[in-house]
Image: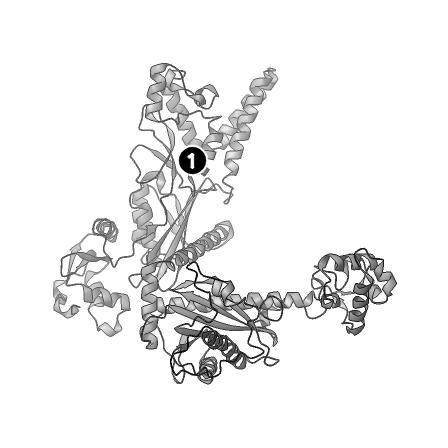
Amino acid sequence: MADPSSYRPRPGEIPDSPGVYRFRDEHRRVIYVGKAKSLRQRLANYFQDLAGLHPRTRSMVTTAASVEWTVVSTEVEALQLEYSWIKEYDPRFNVKYRDDKSYPYLAVTMNEEYPRVQVMRGHKKKGVRYFGPYAHAWAIRDTVDLMLRVFPVRTCSAGVFKNAARTGRPCLLGYIGKCSAPCVERISAEDHRELAEEFCDFMAGRTNTYLRRLERQMAEAAEEMEYERAARLRDDIGALKKAMEKNAVVLADATDADLIAVAEDELEAAVQIFHVRGGRVRGQRGWVTDKVEEITTGALVEHALQQLYGEETGDAVPREVLVPALPDPVEPVQEWLTGRRGANVSLRIPQRGDKKALMETVQRNAQQALVLHKTKRASDLTTRSRALEEISDALGLDSAPLRIECYDISHLQGDDVVASMVVFEDGLARKSEYRRFQIKGFAGQDDVRSMHEVITRRFRRYLAEKERTGEWADGEEPGAAETAPDGTVAGTDGAGLAEPPANTLTEDDGRPKRFAYPPQLVVVDGGAPQVAAAQRALDELGIDDIAVCGLAKRLEEVWLPGDDDPVVLPRTSEGLYLLQRIRDEAHRFAITYQRAKRAKRFRSSPLDDVPGLGDTRKQALIKHFGSLKRLRSATIEQICDVPGIGRKTAETIVAALAQAVPGGPAVNTATGEIMDDTEEPGQQTGSPGEPVSTGAPDERRGQER
C-alpha cells in the first residue's frame, strides 16, 4: 500500500486550469482517469487525510504510485479526452458500464451497391443505417417481414445474391413478392437504392407520408375498378399499420428523444435507456456497473452519456435527452452533445406530462434490471465464498458457515402464529430443507417465547435423530433428547409438517436425508431479545457447537449472544448482503405460510371434522340442502337421500353438526356484507372452496408480521 504523500505534487506545480489527470500504479498502469475544471483544486481533494476520504477513493490513492495530468483549453475538450483515455486504458477504478447483452439492431447497408436489410450486432460500421437497438432479434425479423410487402428490399447474403445472379433465378422471396429481385435485374440499382431509402425513412418515423400515398393509390385503383390492385394496397396499408403498432405511441408530439434512468445502491448502479423516435419507442438497452468510486447520480448520468454517444454523430444523437439528474456542471456536457449531433441538443429533467410518466416507466425498468443483476450475482461462486469468509471473520467463527439456518416468526395480531426455517448451503438456498412450524406452546403474541419454542423443537429433533442413528460419541449423554409431544414440525395438515421417517427419504448418494443435519450458524430475525432466546434454547439442550446471531431490520445490525453492542458490517459487505438475503427469504417463507393458514381457517366448515367425508360428498350435501343451516336441521333419513351418503355416514354428520357451535354470520370479505344462511347455494357458509369468512377480513396486511 502506497503512501499518497510520497507522490503528491507540490501545489505550485499543478495548473489552475481545465484538464484531465491519470493515476498510475507502481507498474505504470493507469488505474483512474478524471477531468476537472481546475486541476489544482480537484487533485488537492485526493491528498487530504485518508480518514476523511471515501473508502473507494482511499483504496484508489493508496494503490496509485504517481499522478500526471494534461491541460486542455475548455471543459468540453476535457470531457472528450477523458472519454478517449477511459476507452484506451480501461482503468480499474473508473465507472465502466458493461452491456448485460449484445443488443441487435435493424441495419440497412447503404454502403453497398444493392443495400441489404439485416440484423446486426457489435460495432457500428460507416455507411450503414441502424435502427434500434431491439430487445430480441426475432422482433426485428417480425417487423421486417411485415414491411417487405411494401418495401421489397434485398435481405439475402452476398453468396445467395451472387448465386441467383449466376443462375438467373431469384430466391423464394423474389417469387412471392417480398423482394424486388435486383439479382436478376427486375429492378435497377438506382430504383432499388431509392426503395431502401424509403424503407429507412419509414423506420425513422416518417410514416404518415407513405400511408397517405398508399391510401390515395388505393382510392384511385378502386375508382378505376382495379379491385385486385386496390386489395393489394389495402393489405400493404394493413401490414404497415401492424408494424407501427409493434411500437406504441408514447409521446403524442412525435418527439425524438432518449430517456435515461438510473437505479443504484451502495455497491452498484443500473442504467436503462429508451430510444423514442417519432413518438414511438424504437429501442431499449441497459447497463450495469460497479461503483468503484464515490460518485453522484449526476456523474453516473454523465458517464452514461459518454458511453452512449461517444462514437455517435448526426441523427444518432437525438434533439432531446431526458435524464433523472443533471451532470455538474451541465453546460460542457450539453455543448459536447451539440457538437456530436451538429445541432442543438436539449439535456434536461422532465417535470410533468407524458415525458415524466414515460421516465417513471424507464426508472422501473432500471430498478428491475438491478434486482435481476443482484440475483445473478448471488450465484457467483467467488462472491459467495467471500461473503461466507466475511461472516466468519465478523462473528469470530472457526470456519466459514457452510450451512446457515434462519428463523422468523409471523402472525396477525397474535393469531395464527407460525415460524419458518430456511436453509442456505454454500451461500445458496436449499429449498428442499425448508421447514414450517406452528407455535403451540402458548397462545398470543410473544416473539421471544415463540423463537425459544421453535429453536427448542428443531434441535430436540436433531438430538433425537442423533441418538436414533447411534451417532453419540463415546461417553456422550443424550441430555434432553426426548422428543416432546409438540416437537413435530408444523405443516400443511394443520398439526405439523409431518416429515417421513429418515430412512424413506434419501439423497442422491443414498445417504438418509435428515432433518437433524446441524448448521454451523443459526440466524434469527430480530435483535438482542430474540438472539438471547435462541441461545438459551440451545444451552438448555446442551448444544454448544452452533453459533447464533440476529439481524435487526431497522439498522441492519448483527447481534451476538451476551454482547451489549451489535456488530456493524459495512454496507458494501458481501457478508451483510448474504445475511440480508437469508433473513428476507425466511420472512417471505413465514408470511406465506401464515397467510395460507389464515385463509384455510376462514374457509373451514363443521363438515371438515367428519372423518371420511371428502370434498365431493361435501359439495353434494350443500347442493342438495342449499345451505349448512338446512343440513343441520335435516334428519338422518333425509341425509341418506343424498347420493353417496350411507346411514352410518349420515349419523356421523348429524353428530358432528350437533356438537359444532354455530359461528357468527358469514361475511363477504370484498364488500363487508353480512350474508344470510338462506341465500343461494353458491354463497353459503361452509361451501367447499368458497372464500367466505366467518371472522375478520382476510387481508389486514398493515398489522401483519
417 and 399: which is toward the camera: 399
Q: Mark 1 Cα within 10 Å, few/some/many (few <14, many 20+)?
A: some
Question: Position of 86 compared to 567: left or right?
Answer: left
Q: Which quadrant, please, contains the C terminus?
A: bottom right
- Residue 689, image x, y percentages: 70, 59
Q: Does the image show residue 573?
A: no
Question: Position of 516 compared to 495: left or right?
Answer: left
Q: Which quadrant, please, contains the N terminus?
A: bottom left
- Residue 648, image x, y percentages: 80, 65
Mark 1: secondary structure: loop
348 and 515: which is toward the camera: 515
681 and 111: which is toward the camera: 681
What colour scheme was applied to this rendering of the protein?
one colour
Name the residue carrying label 1: 204
Q: Residue at x 40, y 82 (%)?
A: 476
Image quadrant assignment for residue 697: bottom right
Q: Residue at x 44, y 57 (%)?
A: 367
Q: Does the image show residue 302?
A: yes
Above or below for 90 versus 233: below
- Which three-letter amino acid code belongs to the residue tagged 1? Ala
Above or below for 559 versus 274: below
- Residue 685, image x, y percentages: 76, 64
- Residue 304, image x, y percentages: 34, 52
191 and 444: which is toward the camera: 444
Instruction: Count numbered badges in the picture.
Output: 1
